[in-house]
Amino acid sequence: MLNFTKRKLGLVSVLSLSLVAAGCGSGDDSSSGNSEGESETSVSEEVEHTIVGIEPGAGATVATEETVETYDSLNGWEHEQSSTAAMLTSLGDAIEEEEPIVVVGWSPHYMFAKWDLKYLEDPEGSYGGSEQITTLARTGFEEENTGAYQILERIGWDISTLEDLMLQAQDASVEEVAQSWIDDNQDKVDEWLADAPEGDGATVDLVLTPWDSERLTGNMAKLALEQHGYEVNLTPVDPAIVFESVATGDSDATLAAWLPKTHGSFYEEHKENLVKVNEAIDGAKIGLAVPEYMDIESIEDLEAAE
Ligand code: PBE
């Protein structure tokens, strides 16, 4: 049932390329966008007017393309897209040498637990504000699988719990960390499962994105549903495919929708065929992040390259 995934992956890369091409900002920018002295100027030069980004298919990547277009201070900047792993390596290396670096960051992620980082202020609001990581289901799922729907309605975590688990997942597999959280929090799981009809072997197809936060929540939801007699399949795909898959009914639900901003365009495209089940995590965030030791506070403190 889920073999649509492979077919669609080609589409994702084509889409990603067009997003890159659409990201070239223009416009006359004679001001430096910097009013606070000379050290900020050197910061922008030292990072070679480059934002270290992540995967082309990420919502945070699309938002960063918009941000580069929005701010005069980012005129002529390069938004380097690669992978989360490569971004984290560059960030770790820079911090080791106390060098400046500007990355695409988000919470929950262990980067904020492991290093002293700060988000650059975003006065234009181009990264949105506080977000909810939302559980979405296909239309009809509640009627056809009331028990699983009820359980998904109750499942949730706070940001600090997830950041802690993500840090643990540096030294163990996500599956192991998920299992040990479930073992340690059976009282909470019991609350999620209370009074919900048993699954009796019914299948629940969950789609998720491939980042650690969603792999953890997906695995914890899977373990909880399995305790109640459901069989759960987890399929990681790009964000665009998550929304399409649930909306078309290829899968049943996802715990991976960052709303209203990060995945807002995907949600808008498919919302007629999606049911908001629950806001499982509140206070998520995306933005440009820098090490605390950097002497800048806002995206407007950066300096245009041209
Ligand atoms: N993220 C992490 C993803 C969602 C989870 C913020 C990098 C994104 O689509 O941007």
Image (tube, rainbow, N blue to C red):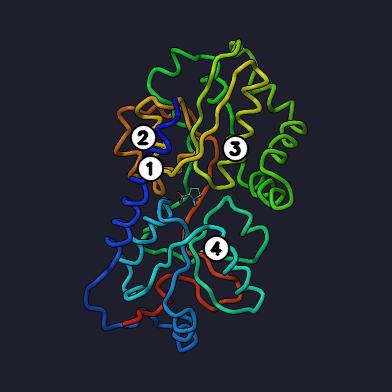
Question: Does 246 appear above or below 45?
Answer: above
**Callout 3 amino acid:** Thr
| Relative side of 62 to 52, left or right | left
Judge: label 4 CB < 8 Å from ligand 1.
no
In the image, what residue type sits under mark 2? Glu
The answer to whether mark 2 is within 8 Å of ligand 1 is no
Query: What residue would you read off at disc 2?
Result: 244
Q: Residues within 10 Å of mark 1 (few under 14, many from 20)?
A: many
Q: State the residue position of label 1.
A: 240
Label 3: how many Cα within 10 Å (few below 14, some 14–19, many 20+): many
The label number, if any, that marks residue 86 in the structure image: 4
**Quadrant holding the N terminus:** top left
Label number found at residue 217: 3
Please report the residue visible at 43 percent of the width from the left and 13 percent of the height from the top. Answer: 143
Q: Is mark 3 within 8 Å of ligand 1?
A: no
Say which label, 2 or 4, has the lower sequence index: 4
Q: Are marks 4 and 1 in contact (CB under 8 Å)?
A: no
Precedes in sequence: disc 3 or disc 1: 3
